[in-house]
Amino acid sequence: MNVGLLGFGTVGSSFYDLTRAEDKGVKVTKILSRRVLTDVSCAVTADIEDIVSDPGIDTVVELIGGLTPAYDHVCRAIKTGKNVVTANKHLIAERTAELYALSEKYDVSLKFTAASGGGIPWLTSLSRASSAENILSLGGIMNGTSNYILSKMYSDNLPFDEALKDAQSRGLAEADPSADVYGLDACRKLALSSTVAFEKIFDTKDVLTYGIQDIKANDTFKADSYGYKIKHYAYCERRGDAFTSFVCPALFPFSSAEASVSGVNNVFSYKPYGSGFFSLSGPGAGGRATALNVLADCIDISRKKERFYGKTLSGKAHTDNGRKSFKWLIRRGEKYDTFNASPASAFNEYEKNQKDKQGALLALICERDEYDD
Ligand code: HSE
């Protein structure tokens, strides 16, 4: 397989190094970069046309990130018959319908395993499982930066702002960490996961999304005293013809897989009808780990062409966040309370109280026995 590589940042350069270190049948023959690259032994161009018009390139690996210019480049690549592999969750989650339709029309593969889980082979496992089983629900700790911040607040008794600064100083959190802290990054990963599991297009705007911005060090200790850890959780569940889909803080019992995931690690789980949870955990970010998943996608394509994880999407998912009740913890100012409500009502209750000058925190209480079939 000959690859045109778009972008040479942390993941792009790691991917390039992996293809050079060992012959896995994947060769980078051209790189798109605006910077001059001195230590690479292939052609470098600043013009996407040099790559998409190259008949020797069969696959484009997009590792630029963001929507612009990645969306235009990926569309051009598909329209010229190239397979596409990307780690770009923003791009795939916000443009699922268009990119799925294009990959069908031009009969090319579009794979994005590293976009949801970094180095964890989550989407491939989920795709395989959902071909054989009816998935009832899926969820996980999908944002490494938030998990790192919460782990630091808990282990070092740091206030939120200092834990965030620590994450930034270690190069974990972005200079603008808002997508991580306010839950958008996890929302995108949840939408992608749901699309692969349920074969529908999930609009990120339908996912109730709330980040870790309200969590105070005291909340982590309060949760601890009740035998729970506070985590940032993304969850989607099928109920009849509709889906419940939300992202928010959540309390997990110490004995759960989620409670023991610390630092930048992620954990992803799915539950088929009539059986328990299956989980995968590991590094959800990082150059080499993410690049390994990108390389694995390329190898999968070269062995067996599957357009979109072998899935046929059947329209837009119908999301109804008022359909099922869950158990919640709410802090209004300093006062904690628990209640049962649908995610739509619980988020409304939080928003009402959050406007109060004392602030509020909402967290799902995860008692998995409740998640019956
Ligand atoms: N900002 C992301 C995270 C990187 O912290 O999880 C990996 O997607």
Image: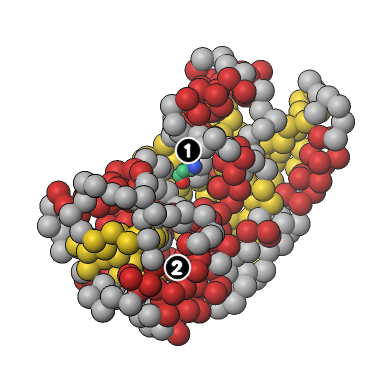
The amino acid beneath tag 1 is Gly
Question: Which of 270 and 28 lies nearest the eye of the viewer?
Answer: 28
Query: Extreme front residue here?
Result: 36
Measuring from the top left, give residue 298's x and y in whole percent. 27, 64
Figure quadrant of residue 347: top right
State the residue at coordinates (26%, 63%).
30
Mark 2 lies within 8 Å of ligand 1 (Cβ measured): no
Residue 130 versus residue 145: which sits nearer the camera? Answer: 145
- Total label count? 2
Above or below, comparing residue 188 to residue 210 in the picture: below
Q: 291 above or below 274?
A: above
Residue receiving disc 1: 144
| Residue matched to label 2 | 73
Name the residue at 53% across, 60% down.
Answer: 68
Type of amino acid at the residue the image marks with label 2? His
Q: Earlier in the sequence, mark 1 or mark 2?
A: 2
Image position of 189 (left or right of 204): left
